[in-house]
Image (cartoon, grey):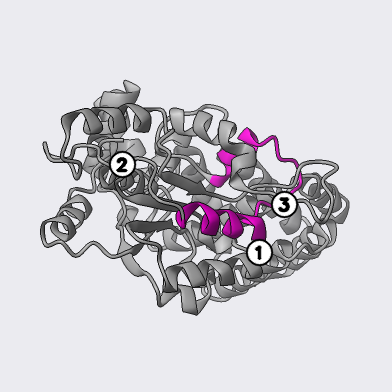
Amino acid sequence: MKFDKVIGQEEAEARLQQLVDEQRIPHALMFTGPEGCGKMALALAFASFLLGERWNGKSLLSRDSAVTNAEAMLAQWQHPDLHFSYPVIKSKGAGSDSKITSEDFAKEWRQMLGGGPYFSLEQWMRYMNAENQQASIFEAESDRLMRKLNLKSSLGGNKVSLIWLPERLNLTSANKLLKLLEEPPLKTFFLLVSEHPELLLETIRSRVQVFAVTRIDDESVSEALTERQGIAPEDARRIARIANGDWMKALEEIDADNENKEFFALFVTLMRKAYAKDVKSLKAWSQTVADFGREKQKRLIAYMMQMVRENFMFNFHNPQLCYMTQAEEAFAQKFAPFINERNVLLFQNRLQLMMRDISQNANGKLQFFNFALEVTIYIRK
């Protein structure tokens, strides 16, 4: 994949180019940054270069035929020296001793990559037809990597292990990956792409060089919306500002049926019923949310945290501080005063606690009903 598919991020690309020019590419590089900033796109483009694809007219391979061959295979994401690792689910009926690896979902992975280098865990879960399962990187994945990476390169060049969301490694798998990072096989590069690097083992974080990626600038998002999605320039600028540097959010905004509209309706219902102390309706609300899969529940919690923040900032009457859609802003006109300095931290701390508990498989129905009841108190402070 060529760098011209990356939206914006010219400064990040220049830093990668500097590593190449100065011949100091680290054996393990971890791309971090806000969601939707394009860190996976950068990692995919850099992995392609490490395996021979031309970048600014130059390739790490010496023979033209080898370069052409490498680029043809990378176009299909089927280069034999590119090893992907990513969170997967255990199929229905799989026993506790089943050895699940990324290869079990290689077809689905390539299908998703074929749609472009920007995607989310939510999209990946749909490709796997996941229901209520939580995706992880299991022990067998590290065993597979150790076996593959200790073999010679199939094409005589570099080998690349690209690990998407390494924070989802289970403990056993993480410890085995640590051994690989401590003693990397010859001509092997590890590229990690993490949404939450703080969840990784400290020992792993100490073995990688962090490559921080910033949000995409609004102008680049606006231009990409116009050029790639056919959005009118004025609408593209509005969407770019709402997206706040998140390309995935920009795409969601132009989707009339995006999930955030559903979450907005749920947020409005919760706040109105909580203000009315309508316990019966709050119980029905919590049952609706409890029927979501855990990943969707966590996305709803994240959305509610964002809405609490945006409504609190709305009270300062500074449009530059708020990032809401027209519908969200219309609701905030009357609702924002109910999120104030007396309760904003109560809301945020409670939502963070619920995010942790849901992630640890707590009972969703109880969690959301308890929260809904507490909102009846918070909203009147």
Residue at far top of view: 230
Q: Position of residue 369 (x, y in %)?
A: 81, 59
Give the main secondary structure of the magenta stretch: helix
Residue drawn at the location 30% of the way across and 43% of the way down: 51
Callouts 1 and 3 close, C-beta under 8 Å: no
Which mark is in front, 1 or 2? 2
Q: Is 9 placed above or below 342 here?
A: above
Tell me the crowding category of disc 2: few under 14, some 14 to 19, or many 20 or more residues within 10 angstroms, Cα based: many
Which SS class for mark 2?
helix
Q: Earlier in the sequence, mark 1 or mark 2?
A: 2
User: What residue type is disc 2 on?
Assistant: Ser
Placement of the N terminus among the 4 image quadrants: top left
Residue drawn at the location 50% of the way across and 32% of the way down: 110
**Front position in the image: 95 or 295:** 95
Q: Is residue 40 left or right of residue 106?
A: left
- Residue tagged 2: 48
Q: Quadrant of residue 251?
A: top left
